[in-house]
Image (tube, helix red, strand yellow):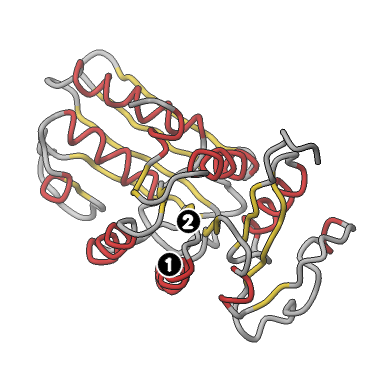
Amino acid sequence: MSPSTPAPLRIAIAGCTGRMGHMLIEAVMAADDCVLAGALDRAGSPAIGQDASAFLGKASGVAITADLRTGLQGADCLIDFTRPEGTLAHLAVCRELGVQLVIGTTGFSDAQKAEIAAAAEDVAIMMAPNMSVGVNVVLRLLDMAARALNEGYDIEIIEAHHRFKVDAPSGTALKMGEVVANALGRDLKECAVYGREGVTGERDPSTIGFATIRGGDVVGDHTVLFAGIGERIEISHKSSSRATYAQGSLRAVRFLAGKARGLYGMNDVLGLG
């Protein structure tokens, strides 16, 4: 490495043996400006002690570990797509060690989100329910559409994911709902309808409906429907690979480089304001 070449970003991956973990490791290994520095998995995993990139048929020299301090030693940033309880445990150690954090985990409660915001006073964190560049462009389009279609249109959000997803609606669907509700001057907590069954009566035009589908290996489909009289507008995003989430995560890592503290979103990463 020449004196003018910046040191590679040292990245640790949480949940490294899962589908998203494998995609993240592959993306890090393929990036010229990144290096795998740590690989975390749950205690008792049969993968503990194995090389983190063995599934790729190549060696990284990084052994999978359940010990957070071992896995984060020397890391600049941890990418975490696990579950809320695990992410918060990782967050506490990252805060202690000064390791930045990119959070793609969904399903946080308001109290848990407050914990993350508090930790961001000491370490730089980028948190988003979806790391896809395309999804975040769609969020901007939804804000524009909702402001223009603010009267006479019923709004429904339909999302589909694979059978293994444990939270519903998806974090991305909820974010879409928040964007639309904010654009309309509404509070999503007050206007969201998450299920319909039986005799529900006529639709309240002030509500935002959610429909959830779980099945097969669907990576992630989201559609926001603005249904008016005589026309329907649909804004959709469909993921065919988790690679887009991995690449978005690396963009987030690069964005955080050099930042001491603060809580950021993908709008900040992409310069969308």
Q: Nearer the viewer, residue 152 or 36?
A: 36
The N terminus - image quarter: top right
201 with respect to 154 (left or right): left
Is residue 134 positioned above or below 53 on the image?
Answer: above
- Which mark identifies residue 101? 2
CA gap, disc 1 to disc 2? 8 Å
Q: Is residue 61 left or right of residue 144?
A: right
Q: Residues within 10 Å of mark 1 (few under 14, many from 20)?
A: many
Q: Residue 164 at x, y = what percent?
A: 55, 62
Q: Quadrant of residue 64?
A: bottom right
Q: Earlier in the sequence, mark 1 or mark 2?
A: 1
**Residue drawn at (27%, 61%), measured in percent from left and top?**
118
What residue type is disc 2 on? Leu
Instruction: Sort mark 2 into few (<14), some (14-19) or many (20+) by Cα contacts within 10 Å.
Output: many
Q: Is residue 133 left or right of residue 137?
A: right
Residue visible at 43% across and 38% down in the picture: 222
Q: Is residue 251 above or below residue 74?
A: above
- The residue singled out by tag 1 in the image is 91
Indicate the quadrant where residue 166 lies: bottom left
Q: Mark 1 belongs to which amino acid?
A: Leu
Across and down, in percent, residue 216 comes to 60, 54
Task: Locate the C terminus and report the quarter of the image it occupies.
Answer: top left
**Mark 1 and mark 2 residues within 8 Å of each other at the beta carbon:** yes
The residue depicted at 26 percent of the width and 35 percent of the height is 179
Query: Between residues 52 and 172, which one lies in front from this camera angle?
Result: 52
Residue 82 picture location, percent across and down:
51, 64
Of residues 185 and 25, the one nearer the viewer is 25
Give the structural element (helix, strand or loop) at label 1: helix
Up-down relation of residue 214 to residue 38 (above or below): above
